[in-house]
Amino acid sequence: MGITKEKAILYCIHCGKETPHELVYIGNELQKIKCLTCGMEIFFDKKKLLLTYSEDLVKRILTKPSRISKEALGDLSDFLETFPLRVITKPKRMVDEIKDILK
């Protein structure tokens, strides 16, 4: 796996404006982003990102029933119109989302 460096103009939260940044990849995975103006670096740890995503996914699954109930109470006609299709397509959308995260 080789190390690749690329440059991009990104918004720096430290500088408060768009500045040149260096993106460092190891293989195909982004490892860090460094602002070339102020030197601020953001590192990416795939294990931590997956853990955070997993926690968010569990929270979304557990709160889905209450979110569906709120939606049904809001606009019942729209809810009844879209709900059957969403029930059918949701598992595929979840699998696709998980696949994208694991890439």
Image (spheres, helix red, strand yellow):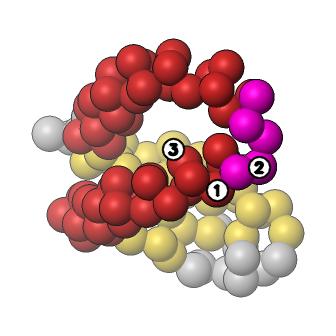
The answer to whether 48 appears left or right of 73 in the picture is left
Image coordinates of residue 5 in percent, x first then y, are 43, 47
Which residue is at a point 67% across and 32% down the rendered structure image?
79
Which residue is at a point 54% across and 48% down the rendered structure image?
68
The correct choice, above or below, for 66 with respect to 91 in the image is: below
Pick whichever, 81 or 98, lies toward us: 81
Image coordinates of residue 8 in percent, x first then y, are 65, 47
The dominant secondary structure in magenta is: helix
Residue of label 3: 6
Check disc 1 and give the amino acid type: Lys
Q: Residues within 10 Å of mark 3 (few under 14, many from 20)?
A: few
Q: Is residue 70 magenta?
A: no
Cβ atoms under marks 2 and 1 closer than 8 Å: yes
Q: Secondary structure at mark 3?
A: strand
Cβ atoms under marks 3 and 2 closer than 8 Å: no
Pick whichever, 50 or 5, lies toward us: 50
Q: Find the residue positioned furthest to the right.
A: 17
Q: Residues within 10 Å of mark 2 (few under 14, many from 20)?
A: few
Residue of label 2: 74
Residue of label 1: 70
The C terminus sits in image quarter:
top left
Residue interval drawn in magenta: 73-77
Which residue is at a point 65% across and 44% down the rendered structure image?
72
